[in-house]
Image (spheres, helix red, strand yellow):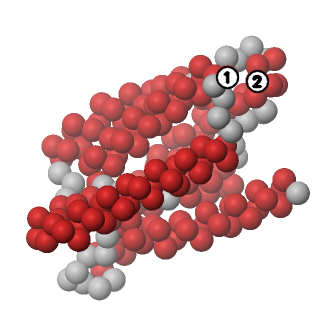
Amino acid sequence: GDVDGVSLILAGVALSSVCSAVSSFILLTGGQKAQPIFAFIFGGLNTVSWTRVAIALPYVLGGVAVLAVTSRALDVLQLDEEQAEHLGLHVARTKVIVLAAASLMAAAAVAVAGIIGFVGLMVPHAVRLAWGGGFRRLLPLSLIYGAAFLVLVDTFARTTIAPQEVPLGIITAFIGGPAFLVLMRRRRRWVL
């Protein structure tokens, strides 16, 4: 059935808490064997190899192709769902297809570089503010600006406290957390 957004977010928070508790327990009891887990949880490009990129590339390209084909439907979905249905869009099917494609791409990226949070939230919003909301333009520009953003953050991570490298996930969380709160506050004002 239909799940409202608040329930979905709360379920995500609860699941995240349980998974965080499990990973914290593993890290506390793992000793030196836990180092690869640290690298994955905090994310970074220091463990990425061309072999891993080649393995993930088909999944990312497949997701990009699906999103490119559905870009017109995504533009229609910017209206409310009822209006999109009246315009002939099968909303439920489109949402499942888009969610599956986006999840596939995110999973491939996380498998290669670990968890680097907030990039998928910040970059598309910044691109939308700068270039508009049409998905034919938004999707490719988000890919380009997202990659550029990661290169900048990675450069900062490698040089800030050299020779030690700060994990990318920590830096993007410091940037993305406040950005998320600003977006939430703006959305709340729009609703009021």
The answer to whether residue 108 is above or below residue 117 is above
Q: Residues within 10 Å of mark 1 (few under 14, many from 20)?
A: some
Q: Which residue bears the numbered disc 2?
A: 84
* Label 2: which secondary element: helix
| 148 sits left or right of 166 in the view | right
The answer to whether residue 129 is above or below residue 153 is above
CB-based contact (under 8 Å), mark 1 and mark 2: yes
| 144 sits left or right of 184 in the view | left
Which residue: 27% across, 38% down?
56
Front residue (pair 169, 152): 169
Q: Position of residue 79 (x, y in %)?
A: 78, 33
Q: Position of residue 59 (x, y in %)?
A: 33, 32
Front residue (pair 19, 116): 19
Front residue (pair 101, 41): 41
Q: Position of residue 38 (x, y in %)?
A: 25, 66
Give the quarter of the image for residue 33: bottom left
Q: Is residue 151 visible?
A: no
* Circle on res. 91: 1
Q: Position of residue 23 (x, y in %)?
A: 30, 60
